[in-house]
Amino acid sequence: MLGFAGLAILFVMVFGGYLLAGGSMGIILKSLPFEMIMIGGAALGAFLVSNDTHTVKHTIKDIKIVFKGPKWNHKDYQDLLGLLHELIRTARDNPVSLEAHIDNPEESPIFLKTSKILKDPEAVSLICDTLRAANLNYDDPHQVEEILDKRMDIAFHSSLHTSHALQGMADALPALGIVAAVLGVIKTMGAIDQPPEVLGKMIGGALVGTFLGVFLAYGIVGPFATKVKLISEEERHFLQVIREVLVANLYNHSARNCIEVGRQSLPKHLRPSYDEISGTG
């Protein structure tokens, strides 16, 4: 909702202020389609040139999260801690039975209790791979820690591709707006013999290009890039909790202490209370 509210405020304040100051929307509306074709088309072309297919697809997908917000909420973290606790208890009580859960999580009664988590392949894969590695009896838990850190860094940097791509577009838009404005000035100079009122409208139309480039860059695309980055950083906490809990398990802490380590690693607005996870004790 904040995304929609922000866009509404942006448009109302900018164009409302312009109209209250006595401005006319006529010139803007007349020039807008042509300026948008030049600026938007050039920005799209540059975006496709500078990014691979994977990034393009993820950018289209990730734009939705600007309006939907982070994937994981307070309840999801509570469910995650409960899931990890049950898996750790199973691993210690009956290591052989754990294999069925981590080899086929889609059919595991433990994973099926948290269907939302089960639908996230990265989270499920991280849990299963780490528990599988623990069963290999690594001599040094630091080996698994190092593997987890590298994997999480790769996943996090991959999640930032959309933000970087959008920010690159935002950085280019003001310059593309100037390009459109210069073309408008060139057109105006070709009609220099026209009366002042005609030239004034033509120059005004050319300046719409500069306005549009700056408006799109700093009012829409730039904030989108920032929001996607913030959400990616927040969603990283989900994988971080998995790491903290399972690393604590490698050091043979009690199952309850492992869960507490994960709980304490969360920021306050996402952290379940002690009472909320006391049932895992």
Image (cartoon, helix red, strand yellow):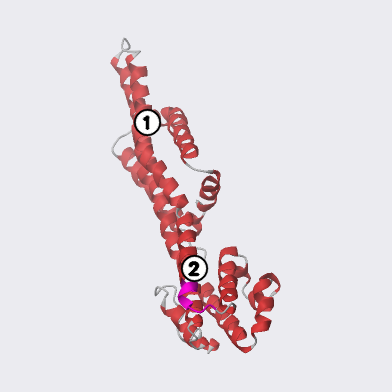
Residue assigned mark 2: 147
* Callout 2 amino acid: Ile
Residue 156 is situated, as x and y percent measured from the top left of the image, at 46, 60
Magenta highlight on residue 92: no
> Pointer 2 and pointer 1: residues touching (CB < 8 Å)?
no
What is the total number of numbered labels drawn onto the structure image? 2
Asked if residue 27 is positioned above or below residue 231 in the image, the reply reads: above
Would residue 150 be seen by someone viewing this image from the given angle? yes
Q: Considering only order in the chain, which callout, 1 or 2, is on the residue closer to the N terminus?
A: 2
Rate crowding at label 2 as few (under 14), some (14 to 19) or many (20 or more) other CA atoms within 10 Å. Answer: few
- Secondary element at image label 1: helix
Give the prevailing secondary structure in the magenta stretch: helix
Residue shown at the point (45%, 57%) measured from the top left: 157
The circle on residue 209 is 1
Q: Give the number of the mark in front: 2 or 1.
A: 2
Quarter location, residue 20: top left
Q: Nearer the viewer, residue 62 or 218?
A: 62
Magenta highlight on residue 139: yes
Specify whether 212 is left or right of 115: left
